[in-house]
Amino acid sequence: MSIELLSALILFALASSATPGPNNLMLMASGANYGFTRSIPHMLGISVGFALMIVLVGAGLAQIFEAYPVSYTVLKALSVLYLSYLAWKIATAAPIRKSAEEGRPMTFLQAAAFQWVNPKAWAMALTALSVYAPSQTLTAFALVAVIFATVNLPAITFWTVLGQQMARILTNPRRLTTFNWAMAGLLIASLYPVLWPG
């Protein structure tokens, strides 16, 4: 993997892991309701579960791309369109409202299993594998998984630690606008090697 592609993958992992989505909103609520320590299994379940999902989905995608080479090009085009749409939605998003959970925090296994029904996780995994793992090998999938796990854990920790404070910070119009446009910009920047391959 080239330095340019690796840098773009790290930017994509950071932007997609740090932006609001089902995992981050649930962690924000968990941090607010149960505290950081009790939310650790939830955080680890997301990080490990998503990394495993990337490898397993990648192994299946490799067979599809080998059987139908045009599917790789189609998936890449759809990924670019989806990321552009997502960037616009992030840049123009409304303030996040705090969501409260009742009962116990999510367990490690529940959080890991949730990745398979999380549409944002599927979109992130498919985009990362189709755009940033051009060799479509198990080694490439593992590298994408390791990068996501490395970048994802600090990002989700951020949401958990802030908890109730995150909702207050992001409802401030100036901070919300700055955050949303920065995340949107990072998503678009991560597409540079795809749109203008060197």
Image: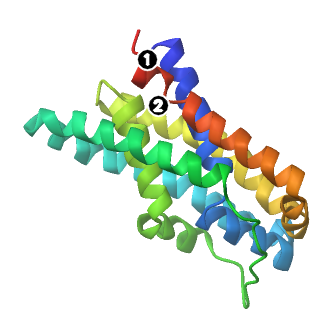
- Name the spot of residue 24 as percent of width and height, x first: 68, 62
Q: 176 left or right of 180?
A: right
**Residue at (61% x, 62% y) in the render:** 21
Q: Using the image, determine if residue 30 lies above or below residue 75.
A: below
Q: 174 left or right of 149?
A: right
The amino acid type found where label 1 is placed reads Met
Q: Quadrant of the N terminus?
A: top left
Q: Using the image, determine if residue 94 lies above or below residue 181.
A: below
Q: Is residue 150 visible?
A: no
**Residue at (87% x, 50% y) in the render:** 175
The disc placed on residue 1 is: 1
Residue 35: quarter of image? bottom right
Sequence-wise first label, 2 or 1: 1
**Residue at (37% x, 38% y) in the render:** 129
- Name the spot of residue 160 as percent of width and height, x first: 79, 62
Q: Nearer the viewer, residue 184 or 156?
A: 184
Tag 2 near tag 1, CB within 8 Å: yes
Q: Using the image, determine if residue 103 lies above or below residue 138.
A: below
The amino acid type found where label 2 is placed reads Leu
Structural distance between the alpha carbons of marks 2 and 1? 9 Å
Q: 58 left or right of 98?
A: left
Q: Nearer the viewer, residue 96 or 65?
A: 96
Q: Nearer the viewer, residue 74 or 92?
A: 92
Within 10 Å of disc 2 (Cα), the crowding (few <14, some 14-19, many 20+) is: some
Residue 23: quarter of image? bottom right
Q: Using the image, determine if residue 6 lies above or below residue 44.
A: above
- Name the spot of residue 130 as percent of width and height, x first: 34, 37
The disc placed on residue 143 is: 2
Badge nearest the viewer, 2 or 1: 1
Q: Is residue 98 visible?
A: yes
